[in-house]
Image (tube, helix red, strand yellow):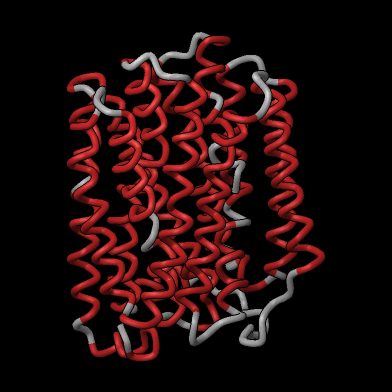
Amino acid sequence: MALWFSGSAVVPALTLEWQLSPSQISWVSIAVQLGFVAGTLVSATLNLPDVISTRHLFAVSAFLGAAVNAVFGLYVHDPSTAIALRFLTGVCLAGVYPPGMKIMATWFRERRGMALGVLVGALTMGKATPYLVNALGSSNWRSNMLFVSLLAAIGGLIVLFFVEDGPFALPPAKFDVSQIVRVFSNRGVRLASFGYFGHMWELYGMWIWIPVMIRASLATQNGDPRLAELGSFLVIGAGAIGCVVAGLVADRVGRTLVTSWAMAISGTCCLVIGLLYGGSPLLLLVVAAIWGATVVADSAQFSSCVTELGDPQYIGTALTIQMCIGFLLTTISIELIPKLAAAKGWRYAFMILAPGPLFGVISMLRLRQLPEAIKIAHGKK
């Protein structure tokens, strides 16, 4: 998953080398989101995660994503080609993330929230990795892109040779295009998805633009640019801890409670973080780390709810559709934040994300009241 932000992490270097406009900077990130949406839409329509080998789908997608990213690092010299390749990278990652969730779900029933929390924690750490590579690696952005491709290829090899479906896996399902509609006829899955959509409105807007805000804030203090890269890695990477802790707690006290509390805290951070711009770097990074830990802590629990409330035969399709819509929403919030930052400054830019977690909290508390919520976390809701 380090492929996801490999382009965003080198944007400062690309901006200097290619003279990127603000719109082109946004599209380097948005293209990945749109590619993922396109990939998940095709995957869900064809029921790919449920009708073919999930492990092979994951591995092939990882190898293709690594190859596309390597082409970017080796041969690209203009923003248009770069944006097109970032779109293709997103398409490839659609064959990694949802299948990975499905594989993990086949290994766990009683501790599924913890298991998926660990997986999303790993995903979060992977997405933070390009910033660590920037901080500690080469000053040549192309070398850093190639190193990230190597990491993605290793991930594909691990899944291909060392991972199998778990004991709770079902036989391959039959192709059924109607599953795209049936997924949301289940009101439990629908409300869990609404919670996920509110969460996604916030998540990628934060993940993509908080490093930019940190860089700008530290620049006002004449701070070391490498500190901004390391800080960005720690802030995003803090989500890995949040995911694991939330998964452990959710299996004991309930998924709807954990997701609601996580969104309440992260939503508060949306409103507060901008007020720290240009102030103490330490205070900014501490609050940003709290935000980073909580903004993704709930992510796996929405997916866990879908696996527990949906049709077991088409879990992969349900997860893929949920992600498709959620990632489509992210393209809007990603586009809005730089516009607000340009108009009102970083002090107010992130406040536009707060309605997302508020909507998510309302949806999850409504889900908690449904009779079928008894299926969540073996009755702990």
Q: Quadrant of the C terminus?
A: bottom left
152 left or right of 218 in image: right
Indicate the quadrant where residue 139 lies. top right
Percent coordinates x, y for residue 296 in the rendering: 39, 55
Is residue 166 depicted above or below 56 in this figure?
below
- Residue at x 61% of width, y 86% of height: 168
Q: Count the marks: how many?
A: 0
Relative horizontal placement of residue 2, taking residue 164 as reference (left or right): left
Q: Is residue 215 left or right of residue 68?
A: left
Instruction: Judge whether residue 96 can be spotted in this image.
Output: yes
Residue 345 in the image, given as x and y percentages of width and height: 21, 22
Across and down, in percent, residue 94 comes to 57, 53
In this orientation, does residue 322 appear?
no
Above or below, 43 against 231 in this view is below
166 shown above or below 160: below
Q: Which residue is drawn at the image coordinates 55% and 17% (left, top)?
A: 14
In the rendered image, residue 323, in percent from the top left (x then y), is placed at 45, 58
> Of 105 and 264, which appears nearest the observer?
264
Q: Residue at x 20, y 20 (%)?
A: 343
Residue 191 found in image quarter: bottom left
**Front one among 87 and 10:** 10
Q: Residue at x 56, y 43 (%)?
A: 90
Residue 85 occupies quadrant: top right
Foreground residue among 155 and 114? 114
